[in-house]
Amino acid sequence: MNGTTWRDFVDSLQELEAYQQKVRKGYVKDRNQYTQTGPQKTGGAPFDEEPPKTRSKSAPPGFGGSLEEEVEPESFDTHDTLEPNIWDDQELKPEIRDRLMKIAQDFIDGLPVEVNIRDVTLTGSLANYNWSNYSDVDLHIIVDFLDVDENRELVKAFFDNARMKWNNDHDITMKGYDVEIYVEDARESHKSSGVYSILNDDWIKRPKQYRSSIDFSSARRKAEDIEFQVNIVSNLITAKKYKLAMKNIGRIKDKIKNMRRAGLESPLQEFSVENIAFKILRRNDTLGFLNDLKKRVYDDMMTLKEEPNGFYGNK
């Protein structure tokens, strides 16, 4: 956190919230004065035609075309064993365990607050039989958020900020798999069919081999529906329908979150249609594109530019 203390972090969030509220009020006033002049289109849909199901030209590489071309169904196949480069049968290889423990401790030691590690776990597909070349080393550091502050949402934001910075600053791999740090609240349950305690060098929840075929077609349809909705948001931003775009971004994010939770809580867990759909969206970067759209709509809403006639308005 580059020397930032917990109090500095709290104060900065409070200052940012106050500033954003002030800017929003100014934006509404300026918008009404400068953008609601001349002919206005009222009622109806924001587009004259139905948006296409393909990515716009501004979409990042990899979008467009069918999901079947971008994400191979075979990448969701299950294996007879855990990843042999990571595991010796059912035991985490000692050199892997030692490195992951060192990474977790270094991350915690770099925080500006004192944090007691309750556990360090490995979860996700590399702690299961559905590992693939898309897998990450999901390194979860378990702490009690209340040890830091009684405002758990604020503590979560603090840890998210810290771990995102760490993930952006470091490029560490274990046998070819990227290491991704997560900070998990000890008071919240984590849904996964395979969880290994790196700290205690033992399984918390041992994975089971799943032999039934995965319904990839249904998962792909779910993913395509969400990708289509994300395209609509992109078109809304292009049409400067910022408020509606932001509303839809929140709705889509909630939909994705609830979809995955429902899948992980189902009997099929990681192999459910809902979780496979989530993985498709993550692998083809639809989730990243949605986050980029959220940043873009906020920036466009807050930006005023000087016009030749001296007026200021949105881009």
Image (cartoon, rainbow, N blue to C red):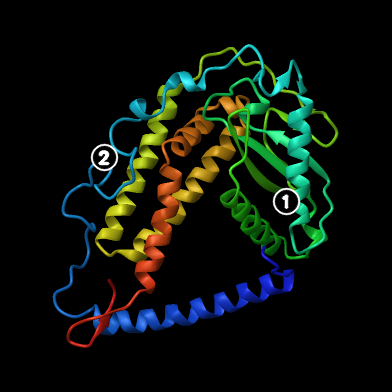
Q: Which residue is rendered at x = 76% and y = 18% of the image?
A: 90
Q: Residues within 10 Å of mark 2 (few under 14, many from 20)?
A: some
Percent x, y of residue 33: 27, 85
Q: Which mark is residue 301?
A: none
In the picture, measured across the screen, residue 245 lies left or right of residue 189, that is left
Residue drawn 36% across the image and 41% down it: 227
Residue 248 visible somewhere in the drawing: no
Q: Please indicate, yes or no, whether residue 40 appears anywhere in the rendered image.
A: yes
Q: In the displayed structure, does residue 10 sit left or right of residue 287?
A: right
Given the image, on which type of amino acid does mark 1 rest? Phe
Residue 257, compared with residue 94, is above or below; it is below
- Left or right of 179? Residue 275 is left
Q: Where residue 155 sits in the image (x, y, percent)?
A: 71, 61
Where disc 2 sits, the SS reads: loop
Label 1 neighbour load within 10 Å: few <14, some 14-19, many 20+: some
Kindly identify the residue that appears in the image at 72 percent across and 60 percent down: 152
Residue 107's label in the rendered image is 1
Residue 38 at x, y percent in the picture = 14, 78
Above or below for 9 versus 38: above
Mark nearest the camera among 1 and 2 is: 1
Which quarter of the rendering shows the C terminus? bottom left
The amino acid pointed to by label 2 is Thr
Marks 1/2 in contact by CB < 8 Å: the verdict is: no
The correct choice, above or below, for 152 with respect to 136 in the image is below
Res. 54 mark: 2
